[in-house]
Image: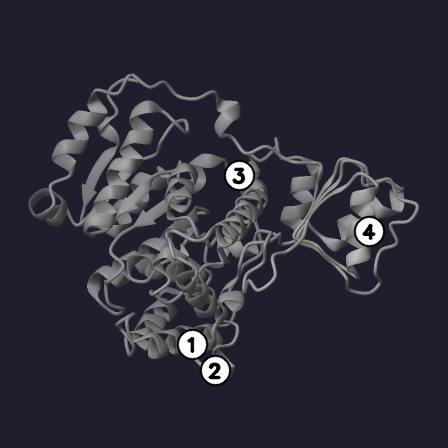
Amino acid sequence: MPTPPPTDVIEPHPCTDEVETRAEFDRRLASGSLAGLTVQGLRLDLPPAPDFTAVEVAGALFVGCRFASREVGADLVRRGANVVPPFSGLPYPTQPSHLYTPDDLAAGFAEGGFAEMYDTRVYEHFRAHGGALPDVREALGQRLHDHGVDNALADATRAWLAVHGPQSVVGIMGGHAVPRGSVPYRMAAVLGWELARADRLVVTGGGPGVMEAANLGAYLAPRPAEELEAAIDLLAAAPDFTDHERYTAAALRVRQLFGQPVRPPRPRADAGSVSRADSAVLAGGELDWARGGGLAIPTWLYGHEPANLFAGRIAKYFSNAIREDTILRLARGGIVFAPGRAGTVQEVFQAATKTYYGTDGASGAYVFLDRAYWTRELPVQSLLRPLLAASPFGDLSPTVHLTDDVREAVRVLTGAG
């Protein structure tokens, strides 16, 4: 029987030898040594171009960085550095140093519509170069990109987890084809709204349907419920995600009308273990994105679906397998499963495997919205309960909850009431 891996295998580790911003790079450069550091995805060709002449660079690794000339990169190699230059001809960064924002993915829509969006152009490139089975050059570019997203995701979530802990992250899964304005869409939006207001980080798979609704609710959490209803009504004019142009235009219109509704971060009173550095980050508003839409983790494997533009940060991968495992690894505060088909059922039992073996530590509740659906149409809970009851960590079947009430789901996930 498999046993859980050691915690040091699965926990993200703070990396003090990675340089991901120009400000940090300039500080390290001024110290006279870049030896042993990893410099990721920086535009070192922009003025003021750094002078490496008197700087120690032995053992440094430059990944996806641009230099003022080829000679600069060649000189670094001669002096003992390792240089992996950005791949030419790719529409995406070889080593992104930050997660995407909705504005990043939607860039180009105003000028050329859906076909000219950054998100669409990357997807078309992905399809043209082998899709899920790319040629070796494309595969290397994609793997480097996804590693950069991994890194950026760990950086983006570190301060949140330091304050709120892993049990504050809640995943919301469900059907991608749920139309805007429908009852399931509205329920998922209210769920995201309630959870974000209860200081839960909402995490979705970044697609349309239930996933978009949950991020929309989190996006509008600082606003009254009436404004959430008004936003859904506006989106309902373009309900079908296959109508890419209208669907995306409606999302951008809602963002324009409602602005960027984030509230100041509020560290909890019991956050005594937070470091001074993390406290400074929180005070500086670094976590506004978490309370202004939460997190989405989509994949270009499903790039035919328009981008979810309501998440605060977007960790978009090429690899669907990495993406699915990442969502479930993060969602230690529980997972809500709204009605869905094969993809959702796969996620149910993929999550159950992690819980059964304790792969990522303790799990939160499994909340199934729509009791009739999960007991009659797709009775997965009749399989899930006996499976979790037989866990080597004891009877975990009480973690399974079925409900038709969004507020009951929130109480289960937050321990309120």
Badge 2 amino acid: Gly
Horizontal and vertical percent for residue 401?
21, 38
Which residue corresponds to mark 1?
115
Quarter of the rendering containing residue 308: bottom left
Q: Classify the position of the N terminus by image quarter.
A: top left
Q: Residue at 41%, 46% (x, y): give it.
A: 323
Which residue corresponds to mark 2?
112
Which comes sooner in the sequence, label 3 or label 2?
Answer: 2
Which residue corresponds to mark 3?
161
**Mark pair 2, 4: CA separation:** 37 Å
Which residue corresponds to mark 4?
26
Q: Secondary structure at mark 3?
A: helix
Horizontal and vertical percent for residue 107?
52, 72
Horizontal and vertical percent for residue 74?
79, 50
Horizontal and vertical percent for residue 293?
45, 58
Tell me if label 2 and label 1 are in contact, CB under 8 Å. Answer: yes
Tell me if mark 1 has few (under 14), some (14-19) or many (20+) residues whose alpha carbon lies within 10 angstroms of its own. Answer: some
**Mark pair 3, 2: CA separation:** 39 Å
Tell me if label 3 and label 1 are in contact, CB under 8 Å. Answer: no
Badge 4 amino acid: Asp
Badge 3 amino acid: Leu
